[in-house]
Amino acid sequence: MKVRTEGSSNYEYVTARVRSRKKKLFDEDDYRKLVRMGQGEIARFMEDTEYGTEMNALGTRHSGIDLVEYALARNLAKHFDDLLTWAEGPLYDYVANYLRKFDAWNVKTVIRGVYTDAAPEAIETDLVRTGEFSERRLDRAAEAGSIEEVTEQLSPTIFGDPLAAAMGDFESEGVLVPLENAVDRAYYAHLLDELGRTVPNSPEGLYGEFLEAEIDFRNLRNALRIARSGADIDPAEYYIEGGQLFDREELRQVATNVDELVERVRASIYGAELSRALEELEAADSLIRFERALEAALLEYSSKLSNRYPLSVCPVISYILAKEREVRNVRAIARGREAGLPVEEIEEELVMT
Amino acid sequence: MLETTDIAAVALQDSGGSAVSKEGAAALAVGLGALGTGYAQSRIGAAAVGAVAEDDEMFVTGLIFTALPETLIIIAFVTIFLV
């Protein structure tokens, strides 16, 4: 599904702005300070930063850690909407496609909300309003009374057909997993479709490589989670097409044996990038650490790409990832402090490069 | 075969001199230099405006970098005095 392709891309303008914004994100020192703050202090600290506008705007409706969380989501949406306003031509297509990630996120939020009979207002506050969907479509979906109505509302979008196809499974099993998988797969399938065939080592080619890496990492994470949980789930059900590390069958085989999986990854093209993550996995035997290391590796990979091809979509993607991490880190800190977790445990949850 | 090349050679000699006068060639050089400058400045300018929009302190740096390709046209301008 094409979004819009007219004229040429304005890489110079967008990358200059994006790089400047990326530099303003929180650094390690800020995180170190944040982790040691109390709840009130975190809110006050946030008011003096990037997030001040949102904190003040939402201050009347929410308070405490909820306020921080909603301010984070709104700020994220604002920044990513900015990207779409700046970008032109093919660059707009790439960014819009990548930001459908939040459409997928919103669809999942709505489905979960409707499934648990949450009030439409409660669902709406949890949405991240960026991506391709219009405000109205989101509001209408949130107001739907049943999952069937949600799928109907979404039928003109890329998620429509996959969701409709997954409805049968949902009805027979009564769990949300088939629907959520359908959403994820629809997102990744369209991400690669749009790119089409590319010349290797060109900016588009590298972007394709990055997307493949993201899909591979996601498959890897899912496989490990299934292997670890020991649950009797077929990992192939969660498989996302488009990666180059595993195919569906291979994933099914390696997911039963963690050691084999680790060996397999070490020998692959991601071996060097993931060596730290793999060491964490073997040494600490901790899945959380491995997942964080995986995310850090993807972040580093995207920064590396953005230096190799400065005038491409890579810096923008790298910024999107970095901003997402920041929001997730701050959220983890705020929630962790609220729950009274010790500093070390919160630090383990953070992704830092 | 030989005849045709001979005829071609004669025809070429006939047109004589150059199509563009010395001054004209110099003007072309300046014009092409200006085109190059414009192309370079449009891209640098876009990046500079983007950087300034995010951070006012980038204004001077941005201005310097935007003005750098100006050297191209200034050097091309010298050709005017050489002919």
Image: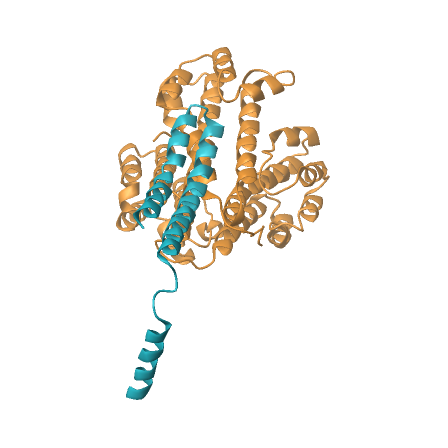
Indicate the position of residue A326 as horizontal and vertical percent values: 44, 28
Above/below status of A350 relative to B36: above
Residue A18 lies left or right of residue A88; in this view the side is left
Colour mode of the rendering: by chain
**Point 36% across, 44% down: residue:** B77
Whether residue A200 appears in this view of the structure is: yes
Residue A105 lies left or right of residue A263; in this view the side is right
**Point 55% across, 34% down: residue:** A82
**Point 37% across, 49% down: residue:** A256
Q: Foreground residue, B5 or B70? A: B5
Indicate the position of residue A218 as horizontal and vertical percent values: 42, 44
Indicate the position of residue A277 as horizontal and vertical percent values: 31, 38
Residue A60 lies left or right of residue A209; in this view the side is right
Image quadrant in which the N terminus of chain A is located:
bottom right
**Point 71% across, 41% down: residue:** A146
Q: Foreground residue, A177 or A245? A: A245
* Quadrant of the rendered image containing residue A11: top left
Count how many numbered circles sit on residues in the image. 0
Q: Colour of chain B?
A: cyan
Residue B77 lies left or right of residue A94; in this view the side is left
Q: Colour of chain A?
A: orange
